[in-house]
Image (spheres, grey):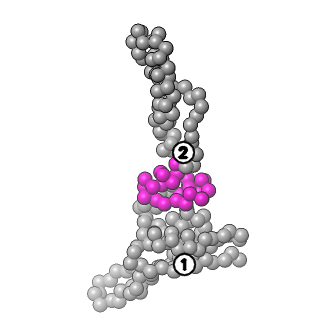
Amino acid sequence: MRGALGDLPSPHPLGETLPSIYRTDLFTQQLCASFDDVLAPVIGALDNLPAYLDLGTAPEDMLPWLAHWIGLAVDRGDDPARQRELLRSTSDLHGRQGTRLGIELAISAVLGVRTEVVESGGASWSVDPTDPLPGEPLPAVVVQVFPVAGQEIDEQRLKDVVAALKPAHVIHRVQIVPAD
């Protein structure tokens, strides 16, 4: 978490920009110095804005805020490295949102586990209009996660992530497959 920095010099002191008659006035110089103390962190933040927005250098408390910008929810309790990895993968995830591959990639990025999604739908083509439709009539997905030995998976969090990722009309079931 960022806070006030003591004795942060202003890169552009206001006292030096005044006409010469005010440069010798002690009260005016002290007033400008107090403004410099207040404005120095603001100027510093604005000068370093690209570093705040870069996922490699952004402070840890900025990561949930950056995720919110792109419509992604990250757990503040997660490891910052995992949050950064998830944010880096969002452009790929948004293009596949709601698909089987999109759900697999997102859960792998969020929880760090291998994931497989089995869906009830299907696709085929035929020149005969009476051919049966592929898949099952009720859309559903089964999400299987495969944690490594000793890795704990929060099942409620997994269910929440799947519910947020899948299309709203599709029912889902979650399976945690234990490591052999």
Residue 174 picture quarter = bottom right
Q: Tell me residue 160's x, y (percent).
A: 51, 71
Pick the front one: 176 or 3: 3
How many numbered dots are placed on residues in this image? 2
Residue 97 in magenta stretch: no
Q: Is residue 169 above or below residue 23?
A: below
As drawn, the label of residue 58 is 2
Q: Tell me residue 156's x, y (percent).
A: 56, 73
Look at the image and give the residue range highlighted in magenta: 62-86
Secondary element at image label 2 = loop
Instruction: Tell me how far mark 2 sits from mark 1, CA to CA.
Output: 34 Å
Residue 180 picture quarter = bottom right
Does the image show residue 91?
no
Tell me the kind of residue under disc 1. Answer: Val
Q: Tell me residue 89's x, y (percent).
A: 50, 57
Residue at x 60% of width, y 59% of height? 77
Q: Tell me residue 145's x, y (percent).
A: 59, 73
Residue named by callout 1 = 174
User: Mark 2 packing: few (<14 Cα in 10 Å), some, or many (20+)?
Assistant: some
Pick the front one: 131 or 115: 115
Residue 135 picture quarter = bottom left
Name the residue at the front extreme: 27
